[in-house]
Amino acid sequence: MRVPFLDRAVASRGLVLALSAWVAFAIATLVHVQNAYWAAMPVWVVAQASRGVLLERALFRVVGTLLGAAVGFALLHVPAPPYVQFLLLGLWVALNGGLTHVLRGVHGYGALLAGITAAIVVVPSVLAPRASLEFATARVECTLIGVLVATVITGLATPKSPAQAFFLQIRHLAADAVAYAADVLRHGAPAMGAEKRRILAEISEVEASARLTLAGSFEGYRRLHDVDSLVVGTLGVMSAAVALRPHEDAPAGWTEGLASRLASVAGRLRSASDAPPEEPSPIPSQADSEASPETGGERLSSALTRLLEANAALARPLGPSKALPFQRELAVLAPHREWPQAGRTALASGAAAFLAAALAHGTGSLLVVQAAMGLCIFPLVLGSMALPQRVAPKLLTGVVAGAFVAALYRLLLQPAFPSPPALWWTLAPFLLVGGFLRAHPRTAIAGVDFNMCFLLASQAGATATVSPLDIVGGSAALATAACLVAGGYILMPRSSVKQAEEAVGVIRRDLLRMVEPGPGDATGDWRARGARQILRLSLHLGRAKDMGWRWPKGMLAVLSLGHAIEALHELPEAAGGPTKAAAFGALRRLVEDPRGTAGEMRRLAGATPDTPLRQVLLDLADGLETSGELLTFGRPSV
């Protein structure tokens, strides 16, 4: 009879993880490392679904541990009162907690470990100040043992990163975007709202995972520039199609011909993504019209060209020079950095570390020290997550279960088998169960916390005599810390909506910077950040399942609005005159009253004889009207 929970892949991976943790613990006990159970802990977090992420995670765990141990040891030897040392610890933890949302991909894991390790060195030393060097040294030694064993054993059983499948996925999404542009020309943007939301949500998810998917590969990191360019081209094609306004004098069938060509391009992208690159031909112009190039197909042609170039670059083998015959400068996409969330994580984790260490020092209680360890670690772990509210219940379940099982282990088994090799065999069944929990997708997150807290609370191999009351109290202290931290996150409102509002806030701020008389770097910043903020907004709204129906209209039109503001700046002053200045003056109200500002743009357009300026003003009016709901998203209604 087949057990659904333990299919072959889960069973195999669980066995490998359990074996790695068991071997790491055995090696640490054989070489008499203090707190040998620490050596098994890296296995549960270093092991990953792909080999590249595993290797990078192992590297950054070692780097973070070395740095954190050095800082923790240095803090304890600062010639200052203990509470000053704890304040410095809080600042260090806050810095690294914030960096987990600034350093993307696997890099933030190093910062997480640097903060955790410093706390692990400092907090236990409250009761034994002279043992700080031993704590730091043991932590580093156990980490090196655990990482080495996990890398060798689990690395052999871990497949390579699915880079080619990732490239194919994002190129197919680009094909979907071109097909969307064709359908918009045929049926209008409102009719394609659901398809737009799907494409944007999938692109944002795929792009956000790019650095994890391509981790551990020099080729993968070199391809990231092509991925960014493909994403920018994809959003550019979609937004240009939404903003395209055929001139009244355009030839009959021009729009249908353009839509047919886009549909043909989409078909080729899906069926022959690996075909040799061909230089894309321009979008046909609207012959016999006085429309500006922007109103015609030049912007759509430029975006489509960038998309096709990036697609061809991804299909082209890397060599000494991978430039294509028609290659343009790669598009710039601003890094994905969640600054507001970084600030919140820094504040929460830093304050928790300071208060926990101060409380442990003030009470001098072993139980409080054990709880303080959890109060330092759990805010960092949860705070580093994109959606800690969703992870908190799983963390709480894993910690409580691990602490409970650890108490039973210490009370019933460890006293009867206190030393190797019997100790190794008593621990093996628990590691095996933990391996299966970690390997199964449904229990993977809770499984990590179960294993980590079981090892931390069991203190397997410790020789000190501890009373049953202290054993139960130690496990209860760790579980209590998890309840306090995870409970706080569970009670907090979902952060996806707040993060979406923050992304829109950045969009509004960047647009307002662009309408200033001397925009400086604002235009360049918009080019880099405009697409990034749309991706951020789509990512957060896609994760907020209860907010799916509140996707604001105008998510693509706002890119066209920024493009039109840039075009207004580029018009010569002699041609614009007072009308151009009046337009910039009215645009300063684009956030407070987007529709009223759009009306002012149309009034100015009707009063100017200058054709290029009139077309730009009409583009601004269209952009404001279409993106009005986005520009006011999250603002209190008046």
Image (cartoon, rainbow, N blue to C red):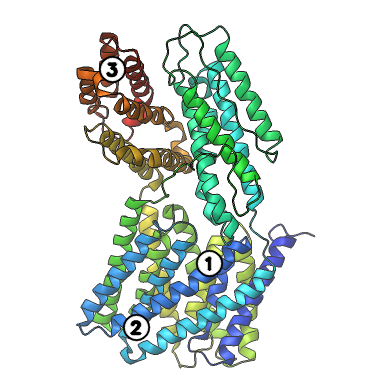
> Relative to 115, is 581 above or below?
above
Say whether disc 2 or disc 3 marks the residue closer to the N-terminus. 2
Say whether disc 3 or disc 1 marks the residue closer to the N-terminus. 1
| Mark 1 surroundings: few (<14), some (14-19) or many (≥20) residues within 10 A | many
Taking the image as drawn, is residue 384 in sight? yes
The residue pinned by badge 2 equals: 73
Indicate the quadrant containing the N terminus: top left, top right, bottom left or bottom right: bottom right
Indicate the quadrant containing the C terminus: top left, top right, bottom left or bottom right: top left
| Mark 2 surroundings: few (<14), some (14-19) or many (≥20) residues within 10 A | many
The residue pinned by badge 3 equals: 601
Closest to the camera, between mark 3 and mark 1, is 3
Find residue 415 and report its horizontal and vertical position in percent.
55, 90
Tell me the amino acid under the disc marked 3: Met
- Secondary structure under tag 2 reads helix
> Relative to 370, is 421 above or below?
below
Tell me the amino acid under the disc marked 1: Arg
Find residue 624 and report its horizontal and vertical position in percent.
33, 23
The residue pinned by badge 1 equals: 57
Taking the image as drawn, is residue 206 in sight? no
> Relative to 609, is 207 above or below?
below
Tell me the amino acid under the disc marked 2: Phe
Q: Give the quarter of the image for residue 521.
A: top left
